[in-house]
Amino acid sequence: MNLRDTARPGFRKAAVLGAGSWGTTFAKVLVDAGAPENGAGESAGTSPAAGIRDVALWGRNEATLSRMARTRVNEKYVPDLHLPDSLLITVDLEEALTGADLVVLAFPAQTVRDQLPAVAEHLEPGAALLSLAKGLEQGTGLRMTEVIAEVLAESFPEADGGHDRAGWARQTCVLSGPNLAKEIADEQPTASVVAAEEPELAAAVAKAIAAPYFRPYTNEDVVGTEIAGLTKNVIAVCVGICEGRDYGDNSKASIITRGLAESTRLALALGGRQETMSGLAGIGDLVATCASPLSRNHTAGRLFGQGKTLEQVREEMTQTAEGLKSAPAVLALARAHSVDMPITEAVVAILDGRITVDHLAPLLLGRQLKSEATPE
Ligand SMILES: NC(=O)C1=CN([C@@H]2O[C@H](COP(=O)(O)OP(=O)(O)OC[C@H]3O[C@@H](n4cnc5c(N)ncnc54)[C@H](O)[C@@H]3O)[C@@H](O)[C@H]2O)C=CC1
Ligand SMILES: O=C(CO)COP(=O)(O)O
């Protein structure tokens, strides 16, 4: 679909909730996307006023956020990024959400559910939700857009002017793709994917977030986009383990390729599409995350490969490596759908301490030989 065709009006204000690496960086993307000098609104064939005018960034830590508001730098997560003066930086959730017709959730996956009731309290009617998290909820096996729809339907039901779960799902979309925050903070050219059930919503969000260095494509496959984004973290942990064990590029390429095969099996079993897995959210993000030393999942894997325990890895990692928490949930979801995911299974066994990294190669290579085209 040509984005000029979308009937949905543009957004006026975006609230980015979660001031970690990606939330902070994405807030800058939104400011740049809305800047008239960057042609905001032009790609939509409308006036520059169609771009987002106000962007707020909300974080929970008062001391950190007030320092950020003063210095315009997020020292812990993106120290080299100077945040635009027009960005509102606040710990007041009501201030961030008032007037926001686009709400961006940039929390780590396992914390999204707990944040949502407070968000629901101040959510503007009709606001769209955009999930940035790449993880699967432990305990429920729900994807982030499912968690969002479930909690908002409970907190803000139809009877109070909200929606049922399906209604909230239609207002929710996901951003995924090869989007290492540090590179985007440096304004390095990047493409991404906005997936939504409603093509008009995906198109409106894509228009609102397109910046000179950030090009979003649209997709209607929410399931495939989310599954690709969360399984690649587990595969990146495995590639990191290979690196830590000093295995070379053949080993890493083998894990990436077979990792894509098992991720695709899961996505298809859940109703996702093959094309999504061959696209930016699929192979694009898998390659970026598995290849880059900037990736936290890759880094965590490397530490395991060097012989560290889960506790030691957790201590060393100061940022979120979603694969460590999502891996058992991915495996449980795969088993519930009778999908074979041997790499994920091996990563979970290492995380649980049931095998060591020395067992990884014999375990994977010792499996029964089969055709590359075998679907299961
Ligand atoms: N950093 C990146 O390059 C990218 C990250 N993502 C995804 O974005 C999500 C967020 O990741 P990052 O920003 O990188 O994480 P991060 O580790 O850089 O920052 C996490 C942020 O969440 C906050 N936080 C932690 N626990 C919380 C809680 N219980 N309640 C509220 N806030 C809490 C922290 O204070 C911090 O501001 C993850 O799902 C990640 O996979 C997606 C694309 C790129
Ligand atoms: O999702 C990402 C890149 O697209 C970030 O990967 P890490 O969370 O492994 O750093």
Image: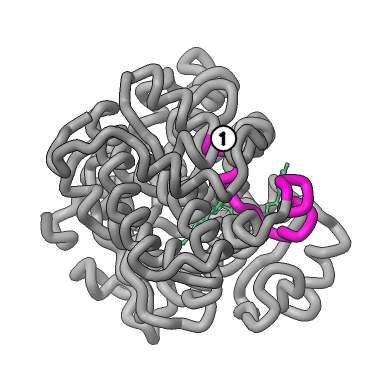
Quadrant position of residue 288: bottom left
Q: Report the front residue among 197 and 336.
A: 336
Q: Is residue 272 left or right of residue 4?
A: right
Q: Is residue 322 left or right of residue 183?
A: right
Residue 316 lies within the magenta run: yes
Specify whether residue 368 is in view.
Answer: yes
Magenta segment, principal secondary structure?
Answer: helix
Residue 60 lies within the magenta run: no
**Quadrant for the N terminus in the image:** bottom left
- Say which residue appears at 55% left-offset and 36% top-offset: 348
**Quadrant for the C terminus in the image:** top left
- Residue 63 in the image: state x and y as whole percent: 88, 62
Q: Report the front residue among 78 and 374.
A: 374
Residue position marked by numbered label 1 in the rendering: 349
- Say which residue appears at 48% left-offset and 50% top-offset: 233
Q: How many marks?
A: 1
Specify whether residue 99 is in view.
Answer: no
Up/down of 375 relative to 205, above or below: above
- Say which residue appears at 56% left-offset and 49% top-offset: 358
Span highlighted in magenta in the image: 309-327
Q: Is residue 221 left or right of residue 131?
A: left
Q: Report the front residue among 178 and 160.
A: 178
In the current view of this chain or complex, which residue is farthest to the bottom?
Answer: 37
Q: Report the front residue among 101 and 242.
A: 242
- Say which residue appears at 46% left-offset and 76% top-offset: 32
| Element type at mark 1 | helix
Up/down of 201 relative to 47, above or below: above
* Residue type beneath disc 1: Ala
- Residue 326 in the image: state x and y as whole percent: 54, 38
